[in-house]
Amino acid sequence: MKLKLFKSEFLSNLSTQMLGTGLAQILPLLIMPLLSRLYSEKEFALYSTFLAYSAVLIVATGGRYYVAIILPKKEKDALKVFCLSIALTILYTFLLFVVCLIIFYGFPNTLNTHGIIFLIPLYVGFFGLWQSFFNLSIRGKRFKLTASSKVIQATTYATVSGLLGLVLTPVGLIIGKISGIVFSLYHLKTRLKLKKDTYSIKNLKEVAIKYSDYPKYSILPNFLGTLSTQSLIFLIGYYFTQTELGFYGLTNMCLMAPLGLVGISFRDVFYQRITYLINEKQINEAKSFFLKSTLMLVFIGVIIGGVLFFFGELIFSLVFGDKWSISGELASILSISLIFKLGVSPTSSILNATNNVKTVSLWQTIYFVTTFTTLLLAILYFKTNLYILLKVYILHEAILYSFYYYLQFKSLKQNN
């Protein structure tokens, strides 16, 4: 009876997360046909570059202690981890601004255009704070709150980007992204209604030491892993034209929609439940839940990937305009890697739940080395064009994500 109620609660939480995340992904997609006509390929390239650098720098926010907010059994310990994450995020953001000032005045580069280099730490800082509040909400099973925060984030992004696009602002997409995270953060903060003494930085040493594996073994590998994830944006931006980067940028944003709708919403609820099962020593139930989750994710991935594989070019031409048909061709190729990522990534939080941070580090280090080695060989030695490069990329993704899934399953078996 208890297990049935637990399953019912999980499905309810998952539905709430998917509804909120679905709306959060659909709203930007609904306005994308307008944005693709308001902004040029080069402006999409600029936005993609901003997102790529931000994603890499976000890795170290809060010393990655925000991941551990869900883990403590005692609420007071969870709040201490939360405060530690907030304090470290603020310090990290300040340091990033200092570094950006040095780069701006001492090392001229394309990021200096329109002051984008200063928008990066601004976004990274707000996103780091948002992650801490978001995970605290997940811990408290406030899934309606987390869902509504994502909807607010997406609505603000779509509205601000659209309005700024009408007045021909080249950084409208970037300002829209920052505005979305700020409004979402404010929503979480006001709804959680934390007491002022919650934000005390006293007596944080104990939890800092207890969960020190996260900064020690998680920051560098995740930094490398994110670099790998953004590798195509960095390499296409450097070795190919800005127009080609713009085409890929739109493709990447659209492919992130199913990963966000299904993957991220599933991951948030999955992490909470798998952690509970492992803490309660219900290992057989955890295995069953893990395998069923994988089957569900792969099934969804095959459906989405199949549609993009056969109709990607047609869909992109009809929705975004004929000039974006090339983005549809790229989406058709990358649809195969989408299946692997959607089937494996959402369940990767099991490695955190089983406290296998070092295993995560191992995979991300291997992923970084093999990604850049493979892609640079293809570009520099074999002189591949963009289409062949993407086919090489999906072969690499298939192999590495299969290995990643093996590591996840192995970590669960070790808890027997």
Image (cartoon, rainbow, N blue to C red):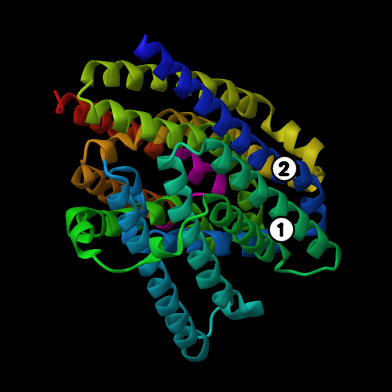
Q: Nearer the viewer, residue 187 or 237?
A: 187
Residues shaded magenta: 380-394
Q: Position of residue 158 (x, y in %)?
A: 73, 52
Q: Which residue is rendered at x = 79% and y = 57% of the image?
A: 162
Quickly name the residue at label 1: 41
Quickly name the residue at label 2: 27
Q: Residue furthest right?
A: 166
Q: Is residue 211 above or below residue 280?
A: below
Kindly indicate the quadrant of the structure image that contains residue 169: bottom right
Q: Nearer the viewer, residue 268 or 56?
A: 268
Q: Is residue 137 visible?
A: yes
Which quadrant would the C terminus be assigned to in this image?
top left
Q: Of discs 1 and 2, which sits in the foreground? A: 2
Q: Secondary structure at mark 2?
A: helix
State left or right for residue 27 relative to residue 244: right
Kindly indicate the quadrant of the structure image that contains residue 217: bottom left
Whether residue 236 is in magenta: the answer is no
